[in-house]
Image: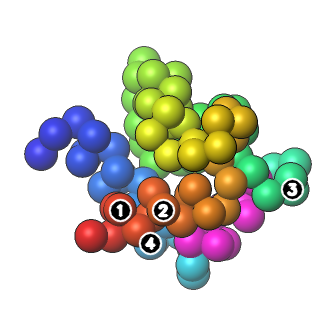
Amino acid sequence: MSTKETILKKIEILITNHFNTPEDAFAFFDKDGDKKLSKDEIKSLLKQAEISGFIRGIVTTKLIEGYDKNNDELISWEEFKAAIDEISK
């Protein structure tokens, strides 16, 4: 399993084990309620998913690069859902 697959699997396990729905997970990590996940909010999600602090910043950047379709450096619900859909495949 590649590092990307391992990280995505840990995120999937976090969401599956601790939240009823992906929407609940998104709302939980959207601390400021702006309907978007900032870098700090994504880092919090990764910390909860037990992603090492050493690579958390790199992974945050890569997640934003991979899923931020409108280039605002934030992850919207639609972008988050696209990531979850990819994980679920």
Badge 4 marks a residue whose secondary structure is helix
Mark 4: which amino acid?
Answer: Thr
Q: How many residues crowd mark 3 within 10 Å: few (<14), some (14–19), many (20+)?
A: few
- Figure check: 35 above or below 6: below
- Please name whichever residue, 17 or 58, is drawn nearer the observer in this view of the structure: 58
In this rendering, would 4 be left or right of 22?
left
The residue wearing badge 3 is: 33
Q: Where is mark 1, residue-wise?
A: 86
What is the three-letter code of the residue carrying label 3? Gly
**Residue lying at 72% horizontally and 61% vertically, measured from the top left:** 28
Q: Which callout, 4 or 2, points at the residue further toward the start of the chain?
A: 4
- Give, as a three-letter code, the residue at label 1: Glu
Residue 1 seen in this snapshot: yes
Residue plotted at (70% across, 46% down): 37
Can you give x and y, in whole percent of width and height, for residue 12 in the image? Answer: 39, 62
In the image: residue 19, left or right of residue 54: right
Give whichever of discs 2 and 3 has the lower sequence position.
Answer: 3
